[in-house]
Image (cartoon, rainbow, N blue to C red):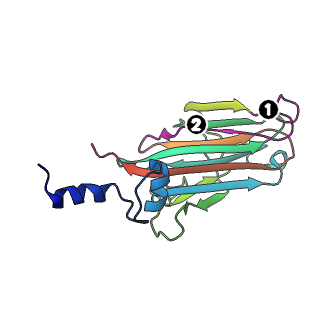
Amino acid sequence: MIGRAAASKNREVKVDLTTHTLQTIDYSHHEIHGGSSFFVTYSIASLGAMTTPTDMMTLTFTTPDTTKWSHFQFDAQGSAGWRLRFIEGSTGGGATPTGSFTILNKNRNSSTTSTIFDIAGTPVVNKVSYDATLLTGGLTLWDEYLGGSGGPHGGSSGSGTRDELILKQNETYQLSLYGTDTDPAILHMHWYEHTNKI
């Protein structure tokens, strides 16, 4: 027979410590409350005007060599049959990034930072490099042409992951969108970082 104290303790496990409500939200939403969920957004006025790299925008980063894995999703918005790719690992490429974005916490009251780091000469944690050259020799996890103005969707088109990808530890990744049209484009990455309990 479970004692009253033990039963009370079991009930507390089901209560969200941030809001003191029963936890009926999904796990990824719960990670936002816990301060372990992050995002980066990159937008440009004209993809076709990009010169370094040519007609392409990229976000490139490396995961840490720990078991705190990134549960990762991405999406993109563009047009004109642009190509969206997500590459894991490489034997080349990923050179001369223009700079790095600071990774933001989805819980704006949290001081927790991401464990992901950029691909600068001296890598910096909580950063993602932008506009590095395309990775080569890696495994393409996602490769899709957006419908665009001439395709079945008409006007601008978007795509991305619905289910999360659990990224490898100690691995380089790159999200890219490229094409020659001069319309605006957006890349958005979001993820939470979690260590398996078993």
Tag 2: residue type?
Answer: Ile
Kindly identify the residue that appears in the image at 41 percent across and 44 percent down: 169
Q: Within the magenta stretch, is there residue 176?
A: no
Percent position of residue 103, x then y: 56, 60
User: Looking at the rendered structure, which numbered label has been put on residue 147?
Assistant: 1
* Residue that mark 2 sits on: 87
Q: Within the magenta stretch, is there residue 169?
A: yes
Part of the protein shown in magenta: 146-170
User: Is residue 133 found left or right of 116 in the rendered image?
Assistant: right
Tag 1: residue type?
Answer: Gly
Percent position of residue 182, x then y: 87, 46
Percent position of residue 159, x then y: 69, 38
Q: Quadrant of residue 20?
A: bottom left
Q: Is residue 35 visible?
A: no
Task: Find the distance from the CA under tag 1 to the CA under tag 2.
Answer: 21 Å
**Depth check: 124 or 40 in front?**
40
Q: Is residue 42 visible?
A: yes
Pointer 2 local density, CA inside 10 Å: few below 14, some 14–19, many at least 20: many
Secondary structure mostly taken by the magenta-highlighted segment of the chain? loop
Whether residue 150 is situated above or below residue 70 in the rendered picture: above
User: Is residue 99 found left or right of 118 in the rendered image?
Assistant: right
Residue found at the far left of this picture: 1
Kindly identify the residue that appears in the image at 43 percent across and 40 percent down: 168
Whether residue 179 is situated above or below residue 132 in the rendered picture: above
Pointer 1 local density, CA inside 10 Å: few below 14, some 14–19, many at least 20: many
- Say whether disc 1 or disc 2 marks the residue closer to the N-terminus: 2
Percent position of residue 136, x then y: 60, 34
**Depth check: 56 or 197 in front?**
197
User: Looking at the rendered structure, which numbered label has been put on residue 190?
Assistant: none
